Amino acid sequence: MCLIVFDYLPDSALPLRLAANRDEFYRRPSQMAHRWQDCPAMIAGRDNEKGGTWLGINEQGAFAAVTNFREMPPSDASRSRGELTANFLKSTLSAQQYLQQLALESDQYPGFNLLLADRHGLYYYSNRESKMRQLVPGRYGLSNHLLDTPWPKLIAAKQRLENANDHNQLQQLLRDTSQPADELLPDTGIGLEWERLLGSCFIQSELYGTRTCTSLQITAGGHASLHEQHFGSNGVALDSNQQSLRFENPWQHGA
């Protein structure tokens, strides 16, 4: 994923309401969210190149999502960031236990931001900060720097989340092509042309762009619904997909 905004309200009827865009080269093969044959209790998209996922949930009540940390020069670490989410969703570890183990080997991965949740809480970890954070209730945004770094598109998406109360509205939030002024763009070392391309919430070009818009809602009763819309070159809409499951362990934060 390259943009995630979410409301985390663990004591409400809707503990998690989330909207996320996955940005990637169109040529990279992937699959829509589905139950994995090698892990049927898990629903997630799949990167066919490396085998991992960018966002998923499982029947045990776990949620995971990852974004890359943009940096120049790129890291030469060998392991795929998609392993981080897939391995958690396949495991029986709590989010906290998983992150404690991950901290010992996080330097084996390129820069990443990781969100993990289970019935005990929602956690954030980046190997460019090396600090596990258990998130308190609130509204958050994550792109390709640390949590809540105030990039223009992230600020705008968090504001639009205020009035996005169902899957249709969450999906529309993600398709904003507004372009910030050059002076507001971050300088991450990739050059102004790329900063402009990546500066909008919904990215479209011939070779690289927003591949998937995902909306996710998790209720206090443990019902998770996931909607996604897929796109091709230059932002052309392709297939859509809807998935749902019931958590065996509904979120009971503070337990």
Image (cartoon, rainbow, N blue to C red):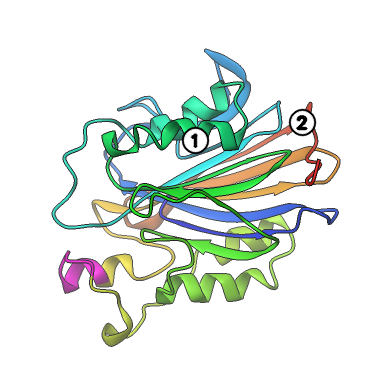
| Depth order, front residue of 139/228 | 139
Taking the magenta stretch, the answer to whether it contains residue 227 is no
The verdict on residue 191 being magenta is yes
Quarter of the image that includes the C terminus = top right
Under tag 1, what secondary structure? helix
Q: Can residue 106 be seen at all in this image of the molecule? A: yes
Q: Vertical placement of 153 versus 245: above or below?
A: below
Percent position of residue 163, x then y: 70, 72
Q: Amino acid at mark 1?
A: Gln
Identify the image quadrant of residue 12: bottom right
**Position above or below: 121 against 245:** below
Residue beneath the point at 61% across and 21% down: 92
**Quadrant in which residue 192 is drawn:** bottom left
Q: Earlier in the sequence, mark 2 or mark 1?
A: 1
Q: Which residues are magenta?
A: 188-195
Mark 2: which secondary structure? Answer: loop
Q: Of the numbered discs in the image, which one, if any, rests on residue 120?
A: none
For disc 1, the marked residue is 100
Q: Relative to 194, say whether 74 is above or below.
A: above
Residue 205 left/right relative to 38: left
Front residue of 218 and 250: 250
Instruction: Tell me where residue 229 appears, x and y as whole percent.
Output: 53, 47
Residue at screen point 83% across, 45% down: 220
Residue 178, given in percent of the width and then of the height, sits at 42, 76
How far across and how far down the image is residue 72, in percent? 16, 57
Q: Where is mark 2, residue-wise?
A: 247
Query: Which residue is outermost to the top?
Result: 38
User: Residue 19 vs residue 119: left or right?
Assistant: left
